[in-house]
Image (tube, rainbow, N blue to C red):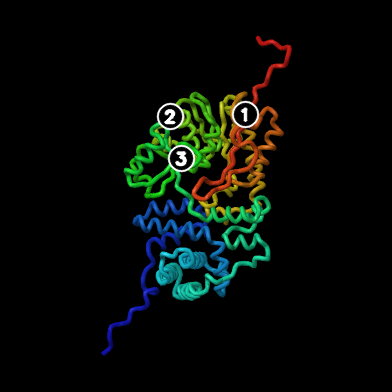
Amino acid sequence: MTGPPRRPPPEQSRPASPARRLALTVLREADRDGAYVNLALDRALEGSRLSPADRSLATELVYGTTRWRGRLDYVLDRLSSRPVDDLPVSIRNILRLGLYQLLYLTRVPRHAALAESVALGREFGHRGTAGLVNAVLRRAADEAAAVPLPPADGDPAERLAVEYSHPAWIVRRWLARFGLEATAALCRVDNEAAPLTLRANLTRTSRDTLIKGLAREGVRAEAGRLCPEAVICRDVRPLRDLLAFRKGLFSVQDEGAMAASRAVAPEPGWLVVDACAGVGGKTTHLAELMGGRGRVVAVDPYGHKLRLLRESAARLGLGGIETRRLDSRRLPESDLAGVADAVLVDVPCSGLGVLRRRPDLRWRLRESDLPGLVVLQRELLAAAGACLRPGGVLVYATCTLEPEENEGIIEGFLASNLEFGAVGLGQPASPLLPTSGGPDGFFVARMERRVRSRPAGMRGD
């Protein structure tokens, strides 16, 4: 008599966990379709029924695997008979996920990382691809930590690019400006998890009151570093579940972004134009700084972003905000030309100051993209300047570290527009680099349109 059939090994029979399946789905969407990781992850989590622990694991897997993709591919190429780029998109991302767990998530046991990866291979491939995943990752479990970096006496950019998982072209640019030690430190910060920073709505609460209210909801928080309304969260759960969120007591915004609105220093009653408003983080901040007294015109070419802006303004209880769907390069043709008290132009940029928050950007961006961005930035700044009245304030902001997008833009604008002068915070100098646990990297320049004096000997009417 034969006994009951033997069960296959666990790594061949157990289905993949929902968290890992969701993480793979997001990574495939980003790799195959060019989706933005943060947006794809938010969509996937919103439609899931994951527990808080699984939501946290899925987020860690997506962001960690994306940050370390360059290092992971370097190791996999040395352990697999097929280059990573030649593998089907699902299989290469399963291998990346598995290797990330083996190398960087020490709380995940080796057998769990292997079993989950094989299960994903069977679900998103077939028996043969599951075997490939099993073979490569079993070898990686034994040998990956010993795979050597590029030689220390060779090209420093190539070594740092692999060691810290950054494209070599970015590393070369930073080495030329910041040197070896500072570049390595900058790359290390990029591979940290970005802090969750909130902006207290000063029209409804204070920073200290918000921190106490969050504590009552079980969220540890502390004061930020740069701005008096900034709050850094240490314990996080879905923000929409918080009473403080529903009451409009805060928005999510990094302190680097807050610094741009702070540089405007808007006064109650002003007419302020947010020339590249997006979903309105800076628009609503400007309205809060003005105490709801004045007019903020938010300009953006995308209607869905302006719709989200209006929803945020309503939640925060802010009036005086007007939205206009318009390419900001056409502002000089509008009724805003020459009348604004202040204009904030937070231009589209390469984003190299926010790579820890947008880890996929390092793999998406190409150095050849920079010249086109510079042209757009010049056009947007010139159009924004045309909106100002004499004596008005013009603030230019980016979230990048690159001089042609920052100092170069300001120097060129001031040379071509002699009625403007740089003043106060952000005179053309250097961007603020991202710091561990602190703000993202950013650049802010504040300028004023001078009031032209009447030539001597002329009399007014």
Closer to us: mark 2 or mark 1?
A: 1
Give the residue pinned by disc 1.
Answer: 448
Looking at marks 2 and 3 on the same chain, the residue that comes earlier in the sequence is marked by 3
Q: Residue at x 46, y 53 (%)?
A: 40
21 relative position to 216: left or right: right
Residue 41 visible to the viewer = yes
Does residue 414 sit above or below 141 in this rendering?
Answer: above
Which tag, 2 or 1, sits closer to the chain's start? 2
Q: Residue furthest right?
A: 457
Circle on res. 230: 3
Q: Can you give x and y, in whole percent of width and height, for residue 214 in the image?
A: 36, 42
Residue bearing the label numbered 2? 319
Q: What amino acid type should be assigned to the residue bearing mark 1?
A: Glu
In primary-sequence order, the first of circles 1 and 3 is 3
User: x%, y% of residue 285?
Assistant: 47, 35
Residue at horizontal 63 percent and vertical 67 percent from the top: 150
Q: Nearer the viewer, mark 1 or mark 3?
A: 3
Instruction: Pick whichever, 282 or 90, lies toward us.
Output: 282
Q: Position of residue 142 (x, y in %)?
A: 49, 74
At label 1, counting other C-alpha atoms closer than 10 Å, the crowd grade (few under 14, some 14-19, many 20 or more) is: many
Direction from residue 409 to residue 363 in the image, left or right: left
**Of 143 and 182, the residue lying toward us:** 182
Q: Name the quadrant of the C terminus.
A: top right
